[in-house]
Image (cartoon, rainbow, N blue to C red):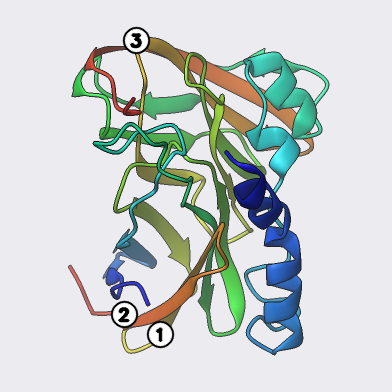
């Protein structure tokens, strides 16, 4: 099981600003290990973000998203205390879901 | 990619289906869409656009693309895209000279800002495109990023 995501969700005016760091190697499948053998591709392919049962962002990724992916976005309709839930699924079927509570922010 | 990996990769869709069957992903949840393998296999802008379902794309000054002019480390290039085009539905990132052009495709539902920030890998100095789908039409902006050390390993 992959390490938890680090999620920060805070109010910025009437919007919720979300910054996420995911723990994932994001192997391209093109890199060679020290023995010269190709390291198989292992990367997050789908990311979904929900708030109150509604999808606020969904993404498909290839291998060229950086290791330990970062994502930053904003959506309307949230308030402090609400939860934001983020799920990713990688090409091997591994998955992880984490949630964060929206803070009052500034 | 060896045969086993290819089989595994090909099985990705069914893994999602299994997860759905297990109730992990409820219908209408964030995983309405599966992974567009055809689009992620493309090797140039025109083919990516086609694989995403677009016929043509218009260059637009209403897309604000924030990225460094020079990336010292191609493994971590911070970029952000903000679309000023009404009814923006999706933002995709395309890196022309990477082994595969399409880096990411973000679907932006109503209520979410037409903005996305992330970090990408670049194999070498390349044009990088922000491709925006708005009201069923495609628009793009392009920027060249010089890369000092490539970020795709090898």
Instruction: Name the residue located 33 percent from the left edge and 31 percent from the top edge.
Output: A36
Whether the residues at callouts 3 and 1 have beta carbons within 8 Å, the answer is no
Residue B2 sits in which quadrant?
Answer: top right
Q: Is residue A79 left or right of residue B54?
A: left
What residue would you read off at disc 1? A83
Q: Say whether mark 1 and mark 3 are on the same chain.
A: no
* Mark 3 crowdedness (10 Å alpha carbons): few <14, some 14-19, many ≥20: many
Of the 4 image quadrants, the one containing the N terminus of chain A is bottom left
Instruction: Name the residue located 66 percent from the left edge and 45 percent from the top edge.
Output: B3
Quote the CA–CA distance across marks 3 and 1.
40 Å
Q: Is residue A5 left or right of residue B16?
A: left
Asked if residue B82 is positioned above or below residue B151 in the image, the reply reads below
Whether the residues at callouts 2 and 1 have beta carbons within 8 Å, the answer is yes
> Closer to the N terminus: mark 2 or mark 1?
1
Of the 4 image quadrants, the one containing the C terminus of chain A is bottom left
Residue B94, x across and y down, in percent: 53, 26
Asked if residue B122 is positioned above or below residue A64 in the image, the reply reads above
Q: Nearer the viewer, mark 3 or mark 1?
A: 3
Instruction: Name the residue located 75 percent from the left edge and 34 percent from the top edge.
Output: B52
Residue A20, x across and y down, in percent: 31, 62
* Mark 2 crowdedness (10 Å alpha carbons): few <14, some 14-19, many ≥20: many
Visible residue check, residue A79: no
In the depicted view, which residue is nearer to us: A65 or B115?
A: A65
What residue would you read off at disc 3? B125
Residue A18 sits in which quadrant?
Answer: bottom left
Residue furthest out toward the front:
A35
At mark 3, the secondary structure is loop
Residue B7, x across and y down, in percent: 70, 52
In the depicted view, which residue is nearer to us: A67 or B59?
A: A67
What residue would you read off at disc 2? A102
* Mark 1 crowdedness (10 Å alpha carbons): few <14, some 14-19, many ≥20: some
């Amino acid at each position: 099981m992959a390490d938890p995501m680090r999620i920060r969700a805070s109010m910025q005016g009437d919007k919720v600003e979300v910054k996420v760091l995911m723990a994932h190697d994001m192997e391209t499948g093109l890199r060679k290990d020290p023995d010269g053998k190709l390291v198989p591709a292992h990367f997050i392919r789908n990311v979904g973000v929900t708030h109150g049962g509604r999808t606020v962002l969904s993404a498909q990724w290839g291998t060229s998203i950086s290791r330990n992916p970062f994502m930053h976005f904003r959506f309307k309709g949230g308030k402090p205390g609400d939860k934001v839930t983020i799920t990713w699924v990688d090409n091997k079927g591994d998955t992880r879901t984490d949630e964060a509570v929206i803070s009052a922010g500034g | 990619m060896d045969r086993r990996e290819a089989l595994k990769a090909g099985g990705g869709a069914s893994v999602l289906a299994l997860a759905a069957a297990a109730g992990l992903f409820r219908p209408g949840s964030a995983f309405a869409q599966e992974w567009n393998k055809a689009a992620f296999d493309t090797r140039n802008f025109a083919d990516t656009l086609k694989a995403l379902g677009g016929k043509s794309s218009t260059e637009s000054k209403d897309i604000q693309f924030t990225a460094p002019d020079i990336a010292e480390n191609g493994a971590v290039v911070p970029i952000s895209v903000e679309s000023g085009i009404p009814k923006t539905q999706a933002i995709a990132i395309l890196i022309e000279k990477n082994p595969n052009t399409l880096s990411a495709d973000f679907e932006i539902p109503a209520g979410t800002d037409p903005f996305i920030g992330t970090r990408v890998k670049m194999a070498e100095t390349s044009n990088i495109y922000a491709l925006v789908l708005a009201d069923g039409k495609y628009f793009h902006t392009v920027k060249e990023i010089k890369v000092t050390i490539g970020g795709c390993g090898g």
